[in-house]
Image (cartoon, rainbow, N blue to C red):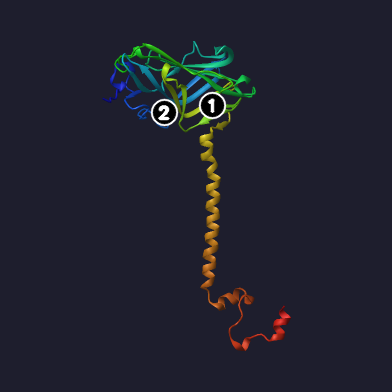
Amino acid sequence: MSWIADISACGALNQTTHLILFSERWNVIDTASDAANKGVYKVYNAGVPCIIVQADIYLYLTYQTSDSEKDVVVHVPTSSTADTAVSTCDTNIATAGMLIPAQLLRINLYHMAGWTIDLGFTEDKRFKTEGKEFTLFQVNVTANFSSDPASFPNAKYPTQNYYLQIDPNDLSDLSGSIYADIGNSYYCPSEQKYAINDNDKYGMAYIKFKLTTIQAYMKSASFGPKQVCPSDENTTDLVPIIVGSALAGLIVLTLVIYLIYRTFLPEEVLNLVNPDSHFDSDSGNELSKDEILERF
């Protein structure tokens, strides 16, 4: 039997709808999001931000119960904050037998004890950045299901970690999509959904970003020039095509209307405009053979 749990009815998460559970996988209803509803998370170094993430974020998670599994969609509260004790502008992340120089943002989910999202950024050349770009190469999610048994009933494991597998020789969709030149910002208003872990053995996990602006390795307090994601670039590129097509259509329409208008003009009017455009139909005004030859 399908059911929907609204966490706003539970004391644990205040009065905002953040979680919807479904029997049908990944059927999302954006009850808590609109164009102005996005979180802003910053990591500072000596008073200047090195990372700013501005986005509306959703987590799609599968968790194990005692006898089956459940799919849950968690909207990250926009009042969530960066964990200043863990987030850093200069660290090394050990993963897949490698030590990756990185910048790290940890988001603590508001009123969701033990729930965190780690976003790791790097400019390491092993991730095809050529040392001139930053990329989001790592996402880890810690889900503390035991923090709210009413919303996560019968969780087999009180806490579950979901993490993105790293392989520089085979970049994930996330790493190959969210990047920008150093000094620029990644800008993507449209929805983008990426796999964190698509192996059902370890629990399915996806992350979705909306209304997104991201910049790492910053040197100033504000976003740099925008680099638009491909899905929104396509929309932008259509604008000059549409405008050009509309102008061409207007020109053709104007020409057709003009030609039709001329066909209905009296011959006298046409002769006033261009006397040589028509010959007088009166026989008395017919040109002689010599005059015709002289004209040519």
Q: Earlier in the sequence, mark 2 or mark 1?
A: 2
Residue sitting farthest toward the bottom? 284
- Residue 24, position in %: x, y? 33, 27
- Res 178 label: 1
What is the distance, in whole Å, between disc 2 and disc 1 at their CAs? Answer: 21 Å
Q: Disc 2 vs disc 1: Cβ atoms closer than 8 Å?
A: no
Look at discs 2 and 1 and give the one toward the viewer.
1
Residue sitting farthest toward the right? 294
Q: Is residue 123 above or below residue 239?
A: above
**Residue 98's image quarter?**
top right
Q: Say which amino acid is labelled 1.
A: Ile
- Residue 25, position in %: x, y? 36, 26
At x 55%, y 41%, the residue is: 237
- Res 37 label: 2
At x 52%, y 30%, the residue is: 187
- Residue 145, position in %: x, y? 36, 14
**Residue 21's image quarter?**
top left
Label 2 secondary element: loop
Is residue 130 visible in this depiction of the protein? Answer: yes
Is residue 77 visible in this depiction of the protein? Answer: no
- Residue 6, position in %: x, y? 30, 23
